[in-house]
Image (spheres, rainbow, N blue to C red):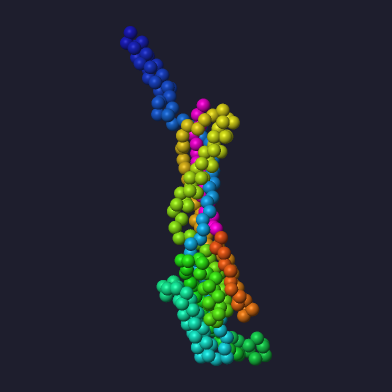
Amino acid sequence: MKRFRSMGAALLAAGLFLLPSPSLAAERPLPTISISGEGVVMGAPDQATITLGVVTHAGTAEVAQTQSAATARAIRDAVMALGVGPRDIQTQNYSFHPDYSRDRNNGREIVGYTVSNTVLIRLDNVELVGQVIDAALTSGANTVDSLDFSIRNTKNLRREALAAAVKDAREKAEIIAGALGKRLAGVQNVSENTQMFQPRMAMNKMVMSEAAMDATPIEAGTLSLEATVHIDFILAD
């Protein structure tokens, strides 16, 4: 009798061992569908950055430096006369170097000097862009390296773009789930990526001449912000 009891206990223990535990059953992966959604919103630029300056060539170092400094002061004064504050005018680059003869027979003979003075100007009023460029060129600037438009505060636009991206992802998921005879039962994972506004390069290394002294029309246009989301939706029957 005792022997039968031992065998019964052993069989019961073996049966319990073979049954799947509740924790293992709960870990069974849920059916999901992975969808990407995109949202794009447009906004009007409300600030601009202009990079311009003067390149001066002269036969002596003193003359090159003096002419460059005088022109740089004239540019600064002309821009400030339009209401641009001194804290919004920044020297971006200053270089001074000798110019050498290209005649190989004369060796590295110095034939003059070049001074390059580049200034960055920040504007909170995009309507002033054309006037600032014209004033700088009239005052002696002979290079306009870049003109960048941007938006100061993109928080609300980011929200709009993200909401549009989520809506796009859900609509796609519902279509696919319906075609599979399923429905959306929840969300497992979400990731997002928002591309911030990149200032638009409107000019690039433009050397201005006296023939280009007409009023400069500058249109800020619009900029776009794009948000992308990746969502893993849970499927159910």
Farthest residue, direction top: 1
Q: Nearer the viewer, residue 31 or 196?
A: 196
* Point 47% across, 52% down: residue: 157
Q: Position of residue 59 (x, y in %)?
A: 57, 91
User: Which x, y percent locates residue 147?
Assistant: 54, 68
- Closer to the camera in the image, 79 or 205: 79
- Asked whether, in this view, residue 208 is left or right of residue 96, the answer is right
Above or below residue 36? Residue 84 is below
Viewer-side residue, 155 vs 59 = 155
Query: Does residue 226 show up magenta in the picture?
Result: yes
The spot of residue 21 in percent (x, y) is 40, 25
Q: In the rendering, at what x and y percent does residue 189 appear?
A: 46, 40
Relative vertical location of residue 181 with respect to residue 160 in this rendering, above or below: above
Horizontally, residue 52 falls left or right of residue 1, namely right
Who's the residue at 52% across and 63% down the image?
A: 149
Residue 64 to residue 197: above or below: below
Q: Which residues are magenta?
A: 222-237
Q: Which residue is pictured at 34% across the width and 12% down the height? A: 5
Is residue 173 visible to the viewer in this orientation of the structure?
Answer: yes
